[in-house]
Amino acid sequence: MGDTGSLVCGFILSALLIRLIEVVPFPNAPILAMSIVFVPIVDTLRITFIRIINGRSPFSSDKNHIHHKLLFAGINPIAIVGILSLVNFSTFLLFWWMSAEDVNINLLVFGIMTSLFILSCHFLKEKKNMKEDVAV
């Protein structure tokens, strides 16, 4: 899948999430929709923040995304897909289960989960010479 395919997939997913927010009858629908795309949202925010802190354009490319960090830590690509899918799915299930809770509690839990995800990305250890061995 190239740039066009991924952009079309993102557009369709965004339209479906907006529709979900309109249809679901509880006030936590936006948080539930964000939990469906938890990993991409948090990874994009993390990367943008890191690039700005380092004085680079947020639109420049690098190998600092979570899937690159997991790959450089020596995890195989199929396991990376499984790990990130499990994180995303468990986040969705948690917020589906918490859908009757107060919006402020959901926002607090979402913030805590985001912080934990970012911290876990920060503390991933890279295997020596992994960047040269892996052509990404």
Image (tube, rainbow, N blue to C red):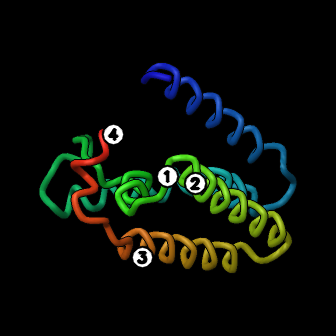
Q: Is residue 104 shown above or below 69? A: below
Answer with left or right where residue 17 lies relative to residue 47. right
Q: Earlier in the sequence, mark 4 or mark 3?
A: 3
Checking the image for residue 76, the label placed there is: 1
Position of residue 85 measured from the top left corner of the image (x, y, whole percent): 64, 53
Which numbered tag is attached to residue 136? 4
**Where is residue 104, by image quadrant?**
bottom right
Name the spot of residue 45 as percent of width and height, x first.
40, 57
Please report the residue visible at 50 percent of the width from the left and 47 percent of the height from the top. Answer: 77
- Residue 64, by quadrant, is bottom left
The amino acid pointed to by label 1 is Asn
Q: Are marks 4 and 3 in contact (CB under 8 Å)?
A: no
CA–CA distance in space, label 1 to label 2: 5 Å
Q: Are there few (<14), some (14-19), or many (20+) residues within 10 Å of tag 3? A: few
Q: Secondary structure at mark 4?
A: loop
Is the residue 124 above or below the residue 132 in the image?
A: below
Q: Are marks 1 and 2 in contact (CB under 8 Å)?
A: yes
Quarter of the image where one finds residue 123: bottom left
- Residue receiving disc 2: 79
The amino acid on which the numbered mark 4 sits, given as a three-letter code, is Val
Q: Secondary structure at mark 2?
A: helix
Nearer the N terminus, badge 1 or badge 3?
1
Q: Is residue 85 above or below residue 8?
A: below
Query: Disc 2 or 3, which lies upstream in sequence?
Result: 2
Residue carrying label 3: 119
Q: Nearer the viewer, residue 63 or 17?
A: 63
